Image: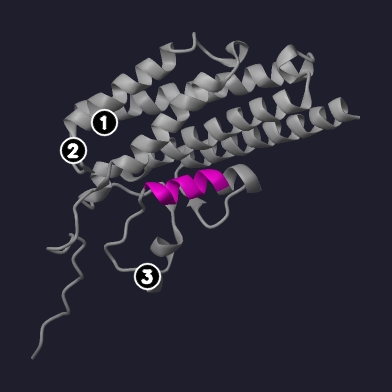
Amino acid sequence: MTGPTPEPTLSPGPDEPLGEPRWPMAAAVVTAMVLTVLLPDDLRLAPRWVLPSVEGLLLLALIAGDPGRIDRRSAALRTLSIALVGVLALSAVWSTVQLVDDILHAGKETSSAVSLLQTGGTVWAGTVLAFALLYFELDGGGPAARAHHMSSASALAFPQQLDPRLSSAAWRPYFIDYLYLGLTNATAFSPTDVMPLAPWAKIAMGIQSLVSLLILGLVVARAVNVLA
């Protein structure tokens, strides 16, 4: 008489790395820092090098505390990660508000089509990266928790999680999955293949869609007006 079939394990195999590489997330943060530097003074939350310096110090602290792969569970590192994402998100939202104000009042930063498209594209790209990092950090307790397959409920449902035929039982989203989510949500103005489950995820995706629609809509309308 045979016993019940054991459940498949969710722990990584002997050849599977525990955590995902840190560099994609770090590259996204550095890119967001560069975009902040490129923004006109009127559209930044603080002087040119203040926010990039703060973000750079937080990133260096994260790399020093958990280098290589993201797999160390620590309250201090978790606090640093959330603080970094919070600064990026605040900066992106502030720049969006200032861009909208500049467009509505025909400010100098949007008086020419070239300047308008450059500034609008920079602000829009910054919001995509900020929200991608937000999803990456908050979903399922964060990347370190996901690396250990902890039982924290996922706030976002990826296709591989909804249909077990698409992946192994141990599959988990990496940063590229959250970057793709941030990009598609900003271009489609709605969920595409990833469904928000938790209230915070629905609110965040809704805010990102509205922000993206506001930026693209006003930039296009203003560009047509300038060119006409």
Percent position (x, y) of residue 166?
Answer: 40, 70
Q: Amino acid at mark 2?
A: Arg
Disc 2 to disc 1, how far (Cα)? 8 Å
Residue 27 screen position, x and y as percent: 38, 37
**Relative depth, front residue between 163 and 99:** 99
Mark 3 or mark 1: name the one nearer the start of the chain: 1
Farthest residue to the top: give it.
47
Identify the mark nearer the N-term, 2 or 1. 2
Q: Alpha carbon of mark 3 to alpha carbon of mark 1: how far?
A: 30 Å
- Contact check, label 3 and label 2, Cβ < 8 Å: no
Residue 8 place in picture, x, y as percent = 20, 70
Quote the CA–CA distance across marks 3 and 2.
27 Å
Magenta region includes residue 182: yes
Find disc 3 in the rendering and name its residue. Answer: 164
Residues 185 and 50: in front is 50
Q: Tell me where the magenta segment starts and ends, as one range.
A: 175-183
Whether pointer 2 and pointer 1 mark residues with C-beta atoms closer than 8 Å, the reply is: yes
Which residue matches tag 1?
A: 78
Residue 123 location, quadrant: top right
Q: Could you say which quadrant of the image residue 11 lies in?
A: bottom left
Q: Which residue is mark 2?
A: 73
| Residue 125 tag number | none
Q: Is residue 171 above or below residue 204?
A: below
